[in-house]
Each structure stands twice: as structure tokens, then as C-alpha cells.
Image (cartoon, rainbow, N blue to C red):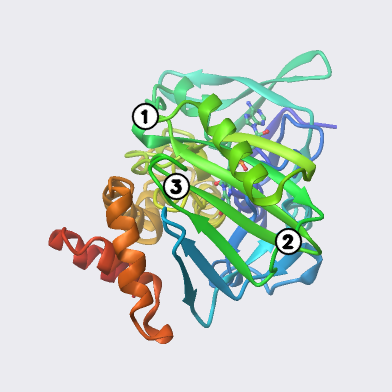
Amino acid sequence: MLKEYYDIVVVGGGPAGTMAAAAAAAAGAKTLVLERDSTIGIPVRCGEAIGIPQLERFFDIDEKYVANRIEGLIMHAPDGTSVQVESSEFGLVLERTRFDRMLAEYAAKAGAMLQTRCEVTGLIMNGAGVEGVRCSRLGKRFEIKSRVVIAADGVESRIARWVGITTHLKPVDLESAYQFMLAGIDVDPRYCHFFLGNDLAPGGYIWIFPKGDGIANVGIGVSTKICDGGTAYQKLQEFISKRYGDVAVISEAAGGVPVARPMKKPVRDGLIVVGDAARYTNPLTGGGISNAMISGKHAGEIAAKAVERDDVSANGLCEYISRIDRDIVKSNQRAYRLKEAVFKLRDKALNDTAHHILALPPKKRTLKNIFLKGLASQPTLVLDIIKAFV
Ligand SMILES: Cc1cc2nc3c(=O)[nH]c(=O)nc-3n(C[C@H](O)[C@H](O)[C@H](O)COP(=O)(O)OP(=O)(O)OC[C@H]3O[C@@H](n4cnc5c(N)ncnc54)[C@H](O)[C@@H]3O)c2cc1C
């Protein structure tokens, strides 16, 4: 079914890839998405939480892919002090399987072709420029030529590495994350929980994201600089058995989360890098769905424009860099500075912050105030904190 040429080949059928394909196809480019897994959206390696405004930037919310609506956050300090954070607008816990499938259907409706069980194993190069992909599907190897390749192949992106971009992440810039989806537990569906502590989750946090009906994603993300994967897994198991005792596990997921500064030059001749592959995950929270969608959409639009103008050189694609700079890079740089400061806080500072916040009237218990109190000893960050939350 696959042709020998497409204007744009997108590698990876996650949110970045399908959004890129939808935008490129809608702009009139012949577009193909190649996904190595057999079903788009499976397996899920995600806590599935997303902010409502981030989703509404692209879609009217459809309950078909929403597991649960969140009304607030509860932050837990190491000494057990809990602070409930109020806001008029929190977020959703998605059913990522259904959400990713919706995105794939959206791309197909826009005119993109999608093919699962097709792994990209190499690039067709002309000097430093990319002119297509080498693939493997059901034991057959073949090539597909293109004007632009969009690398949406996730945190371990090999595509970016093949064109000589340094993709290796320092341990401090990579989190190991593990997650169990638990069933039959007593969990209030209105609140997401975050547990902090130097011993509990070194350089990261434990989360509980309720999906309703006694189901929740319970996970841990820790800095690989401080804690190895095996220890993180054990810490999560201990947390779960302490909190819930013996409990039913519906699914288990593990993955790396880039908590790094964004990739410096995500564009080469004939290539754009998007989503986790370009490290657009928010380095403070580890959330990456919305930036994957944003970068994918920009990449698809710009790639299609470049094909039409017949200039797919890095120069012809560089509008992507300015759009990403405006939409993602500046706020991620700020989040990176905050991450460095927050995860260095000792347990005592985290406990003191929780106590300060509890002394405030409930309306003032906002995320911004938590950060301002917690990082009060680092005045250079105050402006970053304000910018991050205003
Ligand atoms: C445990 C965990 C919990 C998380 N929780 C949250 C959360 O609650 N909220 C949030 O916003 N973010 C969360 N994230 C991050 C979020 O999942 C990612 O940021 C998001 O999925 C990135 O989308 P993407 O399209 O860039 O990459 P991905 O979703 O990783 O998609 C990449 C796709 O490329 C395919 N692929 C890779 N190589 C090839 C190849 N050579 N050929 C063909 N196909 C290929 C892969 O199979 C995959 O389908 C979490 C991550 C982890 C690991």
C-alpha cells in the first residue's frame, strides 16, 4: 500500500507525530506516518494528565477520551503535611489509548496516510541532507523518499542521532519513571496528589492521578543522577504497599522522561525534530503531551510550506525554530531553572514551605505561592517563578 515517495514522512505515531501529520496533510502535503508498534496509542507510557487550556488550544474536549476531571492538587511534604492547592482550572486525566487514536484519526481525516508495524531503521542521506527513510515491515526492507522527514520518535530518538545531533542526555537531565495503574482503591477522583521527599523520590516526585471508579495511575519519576531505576521501582512498590496494601495492578509502564533544556537546533536540511525527541517535555513536571502536540503542529505546517516553496534546507525550515522559541523554549528554560532549584531543596525546606502555606488563607494556597515560599532563599528565581505562573 505504501508509495515510494511522500512529500513528508513522519517517524512515530505519538501525539507529536500525528499532530505533525494532520497539519502537513491539511496544508496539502502528501504525508505518511510510520509507527513501529502494531497499534497507535498502545502501550501507554504516561500518567495521562494534561491541563485543560493546553488541550483546548487544539480541540473541544470530548468525554470519549477523558477518564476524569481534576478539581485540585494536593502536595504532600516529607513529614506528611498536606497542602491542597485551589484553582479554577486544573486538568484532565486522559485515556491515552483513546486520545492517541483520536489524534491518529484526526490526521487520517486531514488526508495523512498512517502505517503501523513499520520501523524506520535508517535515513536516506544526500551529503548532510535527509532525503527519505529506510524501513522494515513484516520482514521486508524498503526505502521511501521524501522532501522532509519529521522525527517524532520519542525520548530515545535515533533519527536525530543519525544526522549527528547529540541526543545523549546527562543523568541530571533524564528521569526514570515507573507507573502502575491500580484498581479497586479508595481514591478521591477530584484530586491529583504529588509526594515530595529526598528519600521518597530523589530529584523527582511520586504522583497519584485518579481515573475515576477506584482506578488511578500511581507513578514515580526520579533523577537518574541520584537514583537508579531498580531503586526507583522499589520505592514505588513500597509507597503503594504502605498506602494501599495488597492491590490489583491493571498495567505497568516504564520509560525515560527528558527533563532537559530543549534541543538547540532541531532542524537540519530535510529534517525537523519534534516532541520528546527534541526534549520539549516540561523539565519541572515531566509533562510532555501538550508540547509534543504544539511542536508537531508547527513542524507539519512549516514542512508543508517549505515543500510548496521548494526550499527544504535547514534555512527554509528555520521558522520552526522561531515558533518553538516563542511557544516552548522560553518557558521550558525557566522551568529548567526552577527544577534545578526545587529538586535541590532538602526535606526541611519542603516541610517548612508546607507549614508556611498552611498558615495562609485557602485562597492564597496557590502553586505560585508554594514556589515563592519554597524558593524564597533564592531571590534570582523569583522573577522566573512569577513568569512561570502568570
Ligand atoms: C511514566 C511516564 C509518565 C508520564 N506522564 C505524563 C503525564 O501525566 N502528562 C504528560 O503530559 N506527559 C507525561 N509523560 C510524558 C509523555 O508521555 C510524553 O511527553 C509524550 O508521549 C511525548 O509524545 P511524542 O509523540 O513526542 O513521543 P511518544 O509518545 O513517545 O511517541 C513516539 C512514537 O515513536 C515510535 N517510534 C520510535 N522509534 C521509531 C522508529 N524507528 N520507527 C517507527 N516508529 C518509531 C514509538 O513507538 C512511539 O509510538 C510521561 C512519561 C512517562 C514515561
Residue at image position (38%, 86%) is 361
- The response on whether ligand 1 sits within 8 Å of label 2 is no
**Ligand 1 within 8 Å, label 3 CB:** yes
Q: Nearer the viewer, residue 108 or 221?
A: 221
- Compare marks 3 and 1 and give the one earlier in the sequence: 1
Choose the circle earlier in sequence order: 3 or 2.
2
Residue 285 location (% of width, % of height):
45, 53
Q: Name the residue under label 3.
A: 280
Whether the residue carrying mark 1 lies under 8 Å from ligand 1 is answered with: no
- Left or right, residue 361 beside residue 56: left
Q: Do the residues labelled 3 and 1 touch (CB within 8 Å)?
A: no
Residue named by callout 1: 225
Q: Looking at numbered disc 2 in the image, what kind of residue is underneath it?
A: Lys
Q: List the residue tagged with mark 2.
A: 211
Is there any visible trace of residue 35 in the rendered image? yes
**Quadrant occupied by the C terminus:** bottom left
User: Which of labels 3 and 1 is toward the front?
Assistant: 1
Secondary element at tag 3: loop
For label 1, count other residues whose C-alpha is less than 10 Å away and answer few (under 14), some (14-19) or many (20+): some
Q: From mark 3 to mark 1, how far is it between C-alphas?
A: 20 Å
Label 2: how many Cα within 10 Å (few below 14, some 14–19, many 20+): many
